[in-house]
C-alpha cells in the first residue's frame, strides 16, 4: 500500500533562501511518525507546505492517493488533513466547545449558509464531547479559551485538530510548555488517537516523548533530510547527535526526565 | 514551606539584587500568588519551578513591574517597585532588570539588527554587540531578516541576546527552553551559568525542563497553587527528587496518572 | 505629449499637500495605531489661527475659561505668526493625544476609528462656531511667479512645494529608519510590552509623535491655504486623498506615501486635462474617482489571502454574544415600535422612522464588522447603489414594488462582492481605508454623474404599494406626513432583517464567521474557506445596506448622492460602534443615535442644542469610544449581568475557572507581547 502522505522533492523558498530543500518523506498509514531537527531546520515550514499555508517552489505532495499541493488550506482539511500550530492560533474569545464545534462541522460555506434557514441551534455533537473528555477538557468546555492556562490551551489545539476525525494529524510542538502532568495527558491522547486509526506526524523537542511513541523518525537539518529510521537507530546516528541531540547518553536521559520524572 | 538544608541556601557575599517580602500578586485585583519571600543575589542562578498554573509567570510579571503587586514589598536593585499599575516597568528596566517573557516580546516587523539595537536600554552601559552575537552564532546570518520570519527557536535566542545587550544586573527569563532543541537548551543554560559567574548578573528562570534547570541553577524555589512550597540548593533538590515530585503532583490539574505511565 | 506634461506638473502643488497630510497620517498611525481622520480638521484649526493672526492680529484660543481671543498687534509679521501657529499646532497634536487617543491606547482598531471621527467632527464644529463657515483668503506664502520649465510656464510655488514634500519624506524616512527615537516608535506601535521592557516610556514616545504630527499637518495647512479656499468643508475633505496617499504607503512607509501623494495630485490634474480634450468622457467624478479605483487594485494585488507566519494581529472588539430569547424580544420591540409610530406625531414620528432605517445600516455593519471583523468605511455606497437602482428599476423599467427593492438590494450585494474580492487580500486598517477608497470611487464615478443619477436633483423613486395598500411616506395627499403605514413598513423590514442577523449568529456560517474573525490561519486549518466566508459576509452586509438604501429612497421619495456620501458612511460606522457593533440590539440603539434620529430630535426640541449639535455629537463619540468598547448595548448587557449576579449571590463576584492563575494576567501581557508566532 502506498503511504498516506508522500512528499516528493519538495522545495520552499523565502526570499531566495531554501527553507525546505528537495525533501522527500513518507508517512505510513496508521503510524506515529516523528519529525525532529534543530531550530530553524524548516520543520514548521514543511508543515505549512503540507497543509497549504505556504506555496511550494517545486515538488509534489500526495495525500491519501491524490496530489494536494495545489489545493487551498481548507480543502486539504476537508480531505482529512488536520494540524496544530506552535503559536496555538486558537479562536480567541470563543469557548473551548465552540473552538471544537467549528472544526467538527467541517461545512463548506454553501451548506453553512443554508443552515441559517434550517435554524438548528448549536446542538452538541457527540464527536466534540468525546474529544473533550479524552483531552481532559470536559470541565472547562464552556470557558473562553483565553481564560485557560497555557497547558490547557495547548490541549485545546490538539483536541481541535482531532475532532473532525482526520486521516492524518500533524502536531507542531504539542508538548512545549506543558508540565509533567499535562505531558502525561498528551501522551495518552496521542496513543489513543493512533489506536483509533488516525495517523500522526509529531514534531517536538521532547525527545522522551518522541523516542517513546514514534515508530519512525525523520530528522531535518538545514531544510534537508539528515536521517530517518526507527527511534533506536536515529538516536544513535552520530550526525543526529552532533546536530541535534548532543551527547548520546545525556540526551536520552535528559529527554526522559524532562518528560515527567522531574529531578532525576 | 519546605526547606531543604536551609543553611546552604544561597551564595554568600553577593549583593542582594531582588527581595520580595510577603508579596501577593495577581491580575485584575484577584490574587494568584500569595505571601512570597524570594531573594536573589549577584552571580546567582535561581530556578522558579512548579506546575503550570502555579503562579510562576505572575511572579515574574509582578517583579518586572508589568503587574501591580497587591500586597507585600518588592525591592529590585535596591529600590522598591511601585504598586501602581504598570507604567513602572520601563523604570525597572533602566535600573538593570531585563525580562524576557515567554512570548519574547520581539518586534516582528523589525529586522533582527533593529531588534538588537533596541536592546541598548537608555541610561545603561552598552554591551558589545559582537561579543553577545558570539554566543548566538545562528543570529549572525539573520541580521537583516524580519524577526517575525524567524523560527521559534531563533526568536528565543534573539530575545535573550537582546536582553544581554543592556548588561542587565538581574536577568529574568520565562520558559527559556520553550520550543528549543535539546542541544540548544543545554548550550543556553551553560551560557547563562557563564554569564552569572563571569559578570555577577543575577538570573531568575522559570523552566519546565526541571533537571536541566537544576543542573545550571544554584538554588530553586518551588511554587504550587500560588504559594512557595519548597526552597533549597539545586544540588539537594536534584538529589532528592521525591520531594519535588510530591510538591508537583499534589497540584497537577490533570490526570494523576501522568508521570507514572512511562 | 507636451500638452499633458504641463497639467501634470501643475498637479504637483496639490500632490505635495496630499503627501504632507499623508505623511502626518502615517506618523500617527505608527505612533499609536490611530488612523487620524482628523488630520484635515487639525490642519484647518491651525490655518485659521494663522490666517486670523495675519489679517486681524488676534490670537484665538480654543480653551474654555480663557478669553477667547487676544489682540497681539495690529500687524503680526509672517515669521512670528508662523511660529505661534506652529506652536498652536504642536499643542493641538499633543492635546489630541492626551485627551482622545491616550485613553484609546488599548482599544480595538475600530474604537480608534470612532475616536478619530469624533475628533474630526468636534474640531470642525469648533471652527464653524468660532470662525463661521465663510471662506477665508490667505495671502500666498511661497512666490508664485511662473518659472519656465521644459518649455512651459509653471508657478514656482508648485515646484517648491513638491521639493519640500520630497525633502520631508526623506527626512521622515531617515528619522524613523536611523534614529533611536524612530526605531523605538516603530517598535512601540507593534508591541507595547516589548518597548516598556526595554526601558522606554510608551506614553512619551506617542506624545512626541503626536506633537510632531500636529506641527506637520499645521504646516501643510498653512502652505495649502493660498492654493485653495480656506473653508471648513474643503479642509476636512482633504483627509480622503491624504488617506489615499497613506494607503499607497501601506501606513508604514514615508517614501511611498510622499510618492503616492504626488502621483495622486498629478493624476488628478492629468485627468482634468484628459476630460477637456476627450469629449465622450463624463464631465464629473473622474478626477476624484479614478485614482481611488487604481489605489484599491494596487493595494489588493500586494496582499495575501491568508496572513503569513508572524503577521501581527490587531486588537479586536469583543466577540458577538449568542443571542437569547430572540422571538420574545422581537415581539416586545415590534409592539413598542408600533406603539411609538402611532403615538408620536410629526417630527418625532419622522425621527423614529429615520432611526429605524439607520438601524438597518447598523445591522449591515453588525454582519460585516461585528461578526467577521472586517471594517468597512464605505457602507453607504452600497446603500446608494441600491437606492439608484431602485429608481431605475421602478421608474425606468417599471418593476413593481416588492420585487424592485429586493432586486435593488441584490444589485448592492453584487457590488459588495465586487468590493469584497480585492478586499480579501488586505486586513485591518488597510482594509478599512481600501473600502473607503472604493466608496469614494463609487460616489465620484457613479453617484455624482448627473446622467446616471440626476445630480443634485436626484432621481425619483416610485411610491410603494402592496395589494392596494399605500405604504408610502406621504401618500397621495400630504395630509399626515409622515404616514404611520410607512413607519410600520420600515418596522417590519427592520424586524425581519434583525431576526435574520440573529439567526445568522447562531448558524454554522455564523460560527465560521466568528472563527475567521478570531484567527484566519486557525480557521483555514479547521476547514473553513476564509475567502468565501468573508465574501458571504460582504454580500449579506451589502444586501442589508441596499435594503436601507431602498428605504431611504422611499423615505424621501427620491434618491440623491448627498444621502450616500463617504462622510455619511463614516458617521454610520461611529454610530453603529457606539450602539454596539457586535449584536442586533446594538444596531437598534445605534439607529436611535443618528443625527436625524429620535435622540437628537428629542434633545433638539427639549434642550435646544441648536448650533452645538455637531460639537456635542463629536465629543459624545470621543467619550463613548473610550468608555464602552462593546457599545451601549454591551455596557447595558454587562451591567445587567452584574446586577443579576449581585441579586443571586451577594458577596461572590468572581467565578474562578481552570487553573489558579497564569490566565488573565498572563494572557493580557502575552497578547501585548504577541506571544510566539509559531
Image: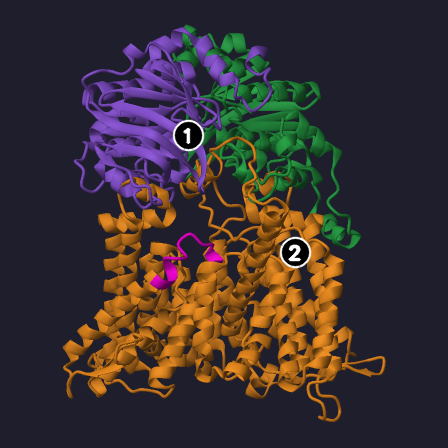
Quadrant where the N terminus of chain C is found in the figure: bottom left
Q: Distance from label 2 to label 1 (Cα)?
A: 51 Å
Residue A264 in sight here: no
* Of residues C567 and A34, the one drawn nearer to the viewer in this rendering: C567
- The hue in which chain A appears in the rendered picture of the protein: green
Asked if marks 2 and 1 touch (Cβ < 8 Å), the reply is no
Q: Is residue C288 left or right of residue C167?
A: right
In the rendered structure, the residue with mark 1 lies on which chain?
Answer: B
- The hue in which chain B appears in the rendered picture of the protein: purple
Q: How many marks?
A: 2
How far from the left and from the top, in percent, is residue C173? 27, 55
Magenta segment includes B87 = no
Give the labeled residue for mark 1.
B34
In the rendered structure, the residue with mark 2 lies on which chain?
Answer: C
Residue depicted at x 73% and y 75%: C339
How far from the left and from the top, in percent, is residue C582? 59, 57
Give the labeled residue for mark 2.
C536
The secondary structure type at the circle numbered 2 is helix
Which segment did they paint magenta? C99-111
Amino acid at each position: 500500500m502506498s503511504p498516506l502522505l508522500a512528499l516528493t522533492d519538495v522545495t520552499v523558498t523565502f526570499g531566495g533562501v531554501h527553507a525546505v530543500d528537495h525533501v522527500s518523506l513518507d508517512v505510513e498509514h496508521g503510524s506515529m511518525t516523528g519529525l525532529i531537527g534543530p531550530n530553524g531546520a524548516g520543520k514548521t515550514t514543511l508543515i505549512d507546505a503540507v497543509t497549504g499555508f505556504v506555496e511550494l517552489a517545486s515538488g509534489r505532495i500526495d495525500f491519501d492517493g491524490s496530489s494536494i499541493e495545489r489545493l487551498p488550506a481548507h480543502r486539504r482539511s476537508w480531505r482529512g488533513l488536520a494540524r496544530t500550530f506552535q503559536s496555538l492560533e486558537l479562536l480567541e474569545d470563543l469557548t473551548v466547545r465552540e473552538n471544537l464545534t467549528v472544526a467538527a462541522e467541517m461545512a463548506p460555506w454553501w451548506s453553512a449558509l443554508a443552515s441559517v434557514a434550517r435554524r438548528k441551534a448549536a446542538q452538541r455533537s457527540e464527536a466534540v464531547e468525546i474529544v473533550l473528555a479524552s483531552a481532559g477538557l470536559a470541565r472547562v468546555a464552556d470557558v473562553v479559551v483565553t481564560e485557560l492556562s497555557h497547558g490547557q490551551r495547548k490541549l485545546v489545539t490538539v483536541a481541535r485538530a482531532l475532532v473532525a476525525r482526520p486521516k492524518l494529524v500533524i502536531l507542531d510542538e504539542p508538548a512545549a510548555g506543558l508540565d509533567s502532568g499535562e505531558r502525561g495527558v498528551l501522551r495518552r491522547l496521542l496513543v489513543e488517537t493512533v489506536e483509533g486509526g488516525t495517523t500522526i506526524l509529531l514534531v517536538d523537542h521532547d525527545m522522551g516523548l518522541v523516542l517513546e511513541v514514534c515508530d519512525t523518525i525523520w530528522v531535518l537539518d538545514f531544510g534537508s533530510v539528515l536521517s530517518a529510521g526507527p527511534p533506536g537507530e536515529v538516536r544513535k546516528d552520530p550526525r543526529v547527535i552532533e546536530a541535534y541531540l548532543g551527547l548520546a547518553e545525556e540526551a536520552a536521559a535528559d529527554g526522559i526526565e524532562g518528560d515527567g520524572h522531574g529531578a532525576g | 514551606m519546605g526547606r531543604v538544608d536551609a543553611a546552604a541556601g544561597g551564595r554568600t557575599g553577593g549583593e542582594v539584587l531582588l527581595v520580595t517580602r510577603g508579596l501577593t500578586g495577581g491580575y485584575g485585583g484577584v490574587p494568584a500568588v500569595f505571601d512570597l519571600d524570594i531573594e536573589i543575589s549577584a552571580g546567582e542562578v535561581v530556578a522558579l519551578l512548579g506546575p503550570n498554573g502555579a503562579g510562576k509567570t505572575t511572579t515574574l510579571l509582578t517583579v518586572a513591574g508589568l503587574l501591580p503587586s497587591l500586597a507585600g514589598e518588592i525591592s529590585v536593585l535596591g529600590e522598591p517597585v511601585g504598586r501602581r499599575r504598570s507604567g513602572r516597568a520601563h523604570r525597572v528596566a533602566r535600573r538593570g532588570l531585563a525580562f524576557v517573557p515567554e512570548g519574547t516580546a520581539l518586534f516582528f516587523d523589525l529586522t533582527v539588527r533593529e531588534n538588537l539595537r533596541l536592546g541598548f536600554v537608555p541610561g545603561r552601559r552598552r554591551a558589545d554587540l559582537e561579543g553577545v552575537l558570539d554566543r548566538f552564532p545562528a543570529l549572525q546570518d539573520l541580521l537583516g531578516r524580519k524577526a517575525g520570519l524567524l523560527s521559534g527557536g531563533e526568536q528565543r535566542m534573539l530575545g535573550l541576546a537582546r536582553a544581554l545587550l543592556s548588561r542587565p544586573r538581574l536577568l529574568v527569563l520565562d520558559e527559556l527552553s520553550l520550543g528549543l532543541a535539546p542541544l540548544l537548551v543545554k548550550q543556553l543554560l551553560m551560557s547563562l551559568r557563564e554569564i552569572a559567574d563571569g559578570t555577577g548578573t543575577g538570573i531568575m528562570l522559570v523552566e519546565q525542563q526541571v533537571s536541566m534547570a537544576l543542573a545550571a541553577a544554584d538554588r530553586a524555589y518551588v511554587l504550587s497553587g500560588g504559594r512557595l512550597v519548597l526552597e533549597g540548593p539545586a544540588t539537594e533538590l536534584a538529589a532528592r527528587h521525591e520531594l519535588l515530585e510530591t510538591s508537583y503532583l499534589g497540584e497537577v490539574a490533570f490526570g494523576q496518572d501522568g508521570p507514572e505511565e512511562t | 505629449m507636451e500638452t499633458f506634461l504641463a497639467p501634470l506638473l501643475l498637479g504637483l502643488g496639490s500632490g505635495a499637500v496630499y503627501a504632507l497630510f499623508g505623511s502626518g497620517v502615517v506618523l500617527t498611525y505608527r505612533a499609536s495605531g490611530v488612523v487620524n481622520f482628523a488630520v484635515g480638521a487639525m490642519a484647518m484649526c491651525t490655518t485659521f489661527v494663522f490666517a486670523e493672526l495675519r489679517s486681524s492680529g488676534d490670537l484665538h484660543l480654543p480653551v474654555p475659561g480663557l478669553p477667547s481671543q487676544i489682540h497681539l498687534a495690529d500687524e503680526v509679521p509672517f515669521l512670528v505668526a508662523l511660529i505661534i501657529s506652529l506652536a498652536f499646532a504642536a499643542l493641538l497634536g499633543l492635546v489630541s493625544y492626551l485627551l482622545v487617543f491616550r485613553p484609546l491606547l488599548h482599544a480595538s482598531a475600530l474604537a480608534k476609528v470612532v475616536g478619530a471621527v469624533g475628533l474630526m467632527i468636534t474640531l470642525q464644529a469648533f471652527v464653524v462656531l468660532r470662525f463661521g463657515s465663510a471662506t477665508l483668503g490667505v495671502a500666498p506664502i511661497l512666490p508664485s511667479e511662473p518659472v519656465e520649465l521644459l518649455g512651459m510656464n509653471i508657478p514656482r510655488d508648485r515646484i517648491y512645494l513638491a521639493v519640500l514634500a520630497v525633502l520631508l519624506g526623506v527626512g521622515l524616512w531617515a528619522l524613523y529608519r536611523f534614529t533611536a527615537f524612530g526605531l523605538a516608535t516603530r517598535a512601540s506601535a507593534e508591541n507595547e510590552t516589548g518597548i516598556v521592557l526595554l526601558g522606554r516610556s510608551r506614553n512619551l514616545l506617542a506624545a512626541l509623535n503626536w506633537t510632531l504630527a500636529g506641527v506637520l499637518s499645521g504646516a501643510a495647512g498653512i502652505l495649502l491655504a493660498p492654493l485653495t479656499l480656506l473653508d471648513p468643508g474643503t479642509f476636512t475633505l482633504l483627509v480622503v486623498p491624504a488617506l489615499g496617499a497613506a494607503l499607497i504607503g501601506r501606513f508604514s512607509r514615508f517614501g511611498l506615501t510622499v510618492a503616492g501623494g504626488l502621483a495622486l495630485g498629478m493624476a488628478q490634474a492629468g485627468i482634468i486635462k484628459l476630460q477637456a480634450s476627450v469629449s465622450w468622457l463624463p464631465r464629473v467624478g473622474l478626477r476624484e474617482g479614478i485614482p481611488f479605483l487604481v489605489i484599491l487594485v494596487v493595494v489588493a494585488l500586494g496582499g495575501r489571502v491568508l496572513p503569513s507566519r508572524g503577521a501581527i494581529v490587531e486588537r479586536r472588539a469583543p466577540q458577538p454574544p449568542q443571542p437569547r430569547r430572540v422571538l420574545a424580544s422581537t415581539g416586545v420591540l415590534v409592539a413598542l415600535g408600533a406603539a411609538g409610530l402611532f403615538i408620536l406625531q410629526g417630527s418625532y414620528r419622522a425621527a423614529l422612522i429615520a432611526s429605524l432605517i439607520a438601524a438597518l445600516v447598523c445591522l449591515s455593519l453588525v454582519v460585516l464588522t461585528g461578526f467577521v471583523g472586517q471594517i468597512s468605511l464605505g457602507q453607504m455606497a452600497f446603500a446608494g447603489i441600491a437606492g439608484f437602482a431602485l429608481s431605475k428599476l421602478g421608474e425606468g423599467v417599471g418593476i413593481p414594488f416588492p420585487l424592485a427593492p429586493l432586486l435593488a438590494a441584490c444589485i448592492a450585494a453584487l457590488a459588495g462582492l465586487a468590493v469584497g474580492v480585492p478586499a480579501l487580500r488586505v486586513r485591518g486598517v488597510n482594509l478599512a481605508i481600501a473600502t473607503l477608497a472604493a466608496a469614494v470611487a463609487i460616489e465620484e464615478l457613479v453617484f455624482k454623474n448627473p446622467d446616471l443619477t440626476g445630480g443634485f436633483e436626484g432621481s425619483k423613486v416610485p411610491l410603494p404599494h402592496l395589494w392596494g395598500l399605500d405604504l408610502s411616506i406621504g401618500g397621495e395627499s400630504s395630509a399626515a406626513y409622515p404616514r404611520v403605514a410607512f413607519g410600520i413598513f420600515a418596522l417590519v423590514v427592520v424586524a425581519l432583517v434583525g431576526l435574520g442577523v440573529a439567526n445568522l449568529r447562531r448558524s454554522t456560517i455564523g460560527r465560521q464567521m466568528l472563527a475567521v474573525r478570531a484567527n484566519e490561519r486557525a480557521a483555514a486549518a479547521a476547514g473553513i474557506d476564509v475567502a468565501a466566508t468573508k465574501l458571504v459576509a460582504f454580500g449579506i452586509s451589502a444586501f442589508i445596506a441596499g435594503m436601507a438604501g431602498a428605504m431611504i429612497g422611499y423615505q424621501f421619495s427620491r434618491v440623491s448622492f448627498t444621502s450616500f456620501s463617504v462622510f455619511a458612511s463614516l458617521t454610520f460606522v461611529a454610530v453603529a460602534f457606539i450602539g454596539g457593533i457586535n449584536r442586533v440590539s446594538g444596531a437598534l440603539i445605534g439607529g436611535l443615535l443618528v443625527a436625524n434620529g429620535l435622540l437628537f430630535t428629542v434633545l433638539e426640541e427639549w434642550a435646544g442644542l441648536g448650533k452645538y449639535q455637531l460639537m456635542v455629537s463629536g465629543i459624545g463619540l470621543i467619550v463613548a469610544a473610550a468608555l464602552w468598547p462593546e457599545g451601549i448595548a454591551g455596557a447595558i448587557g454587562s451591567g445587567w449581568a452584574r446586577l443579576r449576579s449581585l441579586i443571586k449571590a451577594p458577596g461572590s463576584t468572581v467565578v474562578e475557572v481552570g487553573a489558579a492563575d497564569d490566565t488573565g494576567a498572563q494572557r493580557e501581557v502575552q497578547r501585548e507581547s504577541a506571544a510566539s508566532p509559531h
